[in-house]
Amino acid sequence: MKSLRRGLKEWLGTAPGALDQLEVGARIEHVGRVLRVGDGVASIAGLPGARLNELLRFEDGSTGLALHVDENLVECMLLRGGADIVAGTRVHGTGEVARVPVGPGLLGRVLDPLGNPLDGGDPPEGERHEPVERPAPGILDRDLISEPLMTGVTVIDAMIPLGRGQRELLIGDRKTGKTALAVDTVINQRDSDVICVYAVIGQKASTIEQIIDAVRAHGAIERCIFVVAEASALPGAQWLAPYAACTVAEYFRDKGRHALLVLDDLSKHAIVYREISLLLRRPPGREAYPGDIFYIHSRLLERAAKLSAARGGGSLTALPIAETQAGNLTAYIPTNLISITDGQIYFEPKLFYEGQKPAVNVGLSVSRVGAKTQAPIIRDAASRLKLDYAQFLELEVFTRFGAVVDERTKARIEHGRRIRAVLAQPQYRPRPIGEEAALLLAVKEGKLDPLPLGDVEKFKAKLGDWLARMCPDAMARLAAAGELEPDDQQALLSSLDAFIAQLGGPAAAEV
């Protein structure tokens, strides 16, 4: 050994102390060679010790993940690189599973599924690296979902409320507002204690840029993390993206904090997995999807949970997105995801094309957590909203045929039209809880019914500034506690009357 070290020094011409720390000894390496490669999948021979989901390194610096292992052959999907891989390229087994950096150092960053920066910055300083595949919390580690997750979108907070730790599916046809609602929910967390992790799977680069720019302009991007695998990325990277994003979000949940995970979208994720499985020659099932297509999504979404106090009390809320074809909710992937999640929000194309945005069909949407998570003031103000709105939609159908209706029916229809006007909301304008409560109270008490329908938009546009000026203390207490004392509620109603009177509506005579 001494003679070997001396020989190295003489051959390199190095000063005597330069190689003192060099340790020379035998080391076992698992090395194989590529048999064939194409379409983001490589077949490798000579790695009998490889394990399932092991990370593999190619000699050109590319990375792959083993998806099928037997004695003579390893099938892996490429995660990055791969342009220079040919038959005969050497492959090294690392003995490690895929990991991603986690920690506060990732906040405000745009990363790929392995934690490499995509925003032009330095590599993120993670607190540690965690496996992208982790088991879901057990039953005893979970707690009841009782805290609201405010989206700032009135139709959701009033009639389809979400709770911290819930899994709510956003589903609908292409271009009906699913991503817009998810982005608005992220923007609304700018003043909350929720950390947002947004996983982008198979989207166009222009769409990804729009999402990030919207959060940067309207939200708090310094409290968000983006895990991106765009449409041009390798199928393996697109497949890994939601699991990596979930691991990043779980760090904050396990620290006793609250996190929101958006998965945009799992329909593309399922298509990518079908592509990989067919390339690996796995037996196809229904619609050519592999038999474990349900499992790849269930093991992901089960990781979203509200933890018990013994585990820190943190929560991870998941908003997966799924795309339907021609409104078909009974298709294979949509039904799988509906059965896994705790409810769904359905975006109807007909409503979207009629200009009702968000285009949420409240009849086909449901939150299985229900009103238990609503703030008390919202729960009280919206107690009859869904029933009144459903009755209005039924009555409106008859009026389209020119049917003669009595005065009571006319009043219900006019009330329903004002409900619909209140539920309409522009993008990037999530409402604070005080403004939502005031709108819902105005609807519940019928204060908007005498107001001309065209003036409802003016009422909504100026209401926030009016409340901030007229009853700031009540709004502050409402934002902090989610409920109002009787005196504060009466003051709020009086402010609404005064505001309607100022708009010049018929309610002026009552003030």
Image: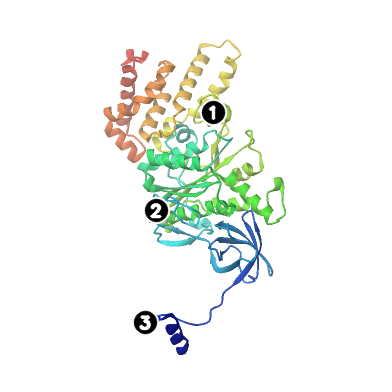
User: Which amino acid, mark 2?
Assistant: Gly
The label on residue 15 is 3
Is 90 placed above or below 351 here?
A: below
Distance CA(mark 1)–CA(mark 3): 75 Å
* The residue positioned farthest toward the top in the image shown: 404
Q: Position of residue 446 (x, y in %)?
A: 42, 21
Residue at point 56%, 19% (across, down): 396
In this image, 144 relative to 276: left or right?
left
**179 sits left or right of 67 in the view:** left
Q: Of 428 and 279, which appears nearest the observer?
A: 279
Residue 284: percent from left, percent from top: 72, 51
Residue 373 in view: no
**Residue occupied by mark 1:** 352
Which numbered disc, 1 or 3, marks the residue that appears first in the sequence? 3
In the rendered image, which residue does mark 2 sit on?
121
Secondary structure, mark 2, is loop
Comparing labels 2 and 1, the label whose residue is closer to the camera: 2
Image check: 230 left or right of 67? Answer: left
Q: Is residue 371 above or below residue 77?
A: above
Give coordinates of residue 221: x percent, y percent.
Answer: 38, 45
Residue 311 figure quarter: bottom left
Q: Is residue 248 above or below residue 49?
A: above
Left or right of residue 497, residue 29 in this image: right
Q: Closer to the camera, 473 or 7?
A: 7
The label on residue 39 is none
Q: Residues within 10 Å of mark 3 (few under 14, many from 20)?
A: few
